[in-house]
Amino acid sequence: MKNIKFLKRIEIGKKFSRRLRINNQFPAIIYGKKKKEMPIMINNEDIINIDFKNFFKKKIQLIDEKKKIYKVKIIDIQYHPYKNNKIFHIDFLFV
């Protein structure tokens, strides 16, 4: 099972997401299982070596700054329209 580090986001919106992408990060969200949705941000370096074709079927562990582990599955990945394989946003589902 792959471990990915993340930070919780306090701010949301287009302006904040643009600032994240400029700083080599991208926004994501975790939702599901009657839990409140959690907006997060992930560094590109932490996720760059993942083969996403196989990860839609596997469980992933997300680890926050307090070392709390969340087991999730990838639901959707949005890529930049013309930059090769640059991730724009990821949706995770609590498992």
Image (spheres, helix red, strand yellow):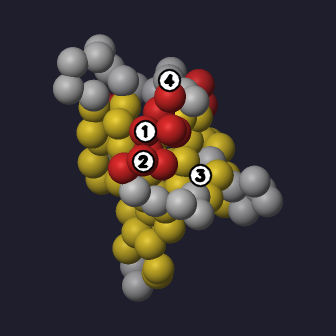
Check if mark 2's residue and mark 3's residue have beta carbons within 8 Å. no
- Assess disc 1: are there few (<14), some (14-19) or many (≥20) residues with their C-alpha within 10 Å of its C-alpha: some
SS state under label 4: loop
Q: Residue 46: image x %, image y %?
A: 60, 31
Front position in the image: 92 or 41: 41
Residue beneath disc 1: 18
Badge 1 vs badge 2, beta-carbon distance below 8 Å? yes
Quadrant where the C terminus is found in the figure: bottom left
Residue furthest to the top: 84
Mark 4, residue position: 48
Give the CA separation, mark 1 to mark 2: 5 Å
Query: Sequence order check: which comes first, mark 2 or mark 4?
Result: 2
Q: Amino acid at mark 1?
A: Arg
The residue carrying mark 2 is 15
Residue 8, percent from left and from top: 61, 58
Are dots 4 and 3 in contact, CB under 8 Å? no
Q: Residue at x 29, y 14 (%)?
A: 84
> Could you tell me if residue 46 is visible in this image?
yes
User: Does residue 59 appear to the left or right of 85 in the view shown?
Assistant: right
Q: Tag 3 or tag 2, which sits nearer the N-term?
A: 2
Residue kind at label 3, given as amino acid type? Leu
Q: Looking at the rendered structure, which numbered label has been put on residue 62?
A: 3
Residue type at tag 2: Lys
* Image position of 31 with respect to 53: above or below: below
Q: CA distance from mark 4 to mark 3?
A: 15 Å
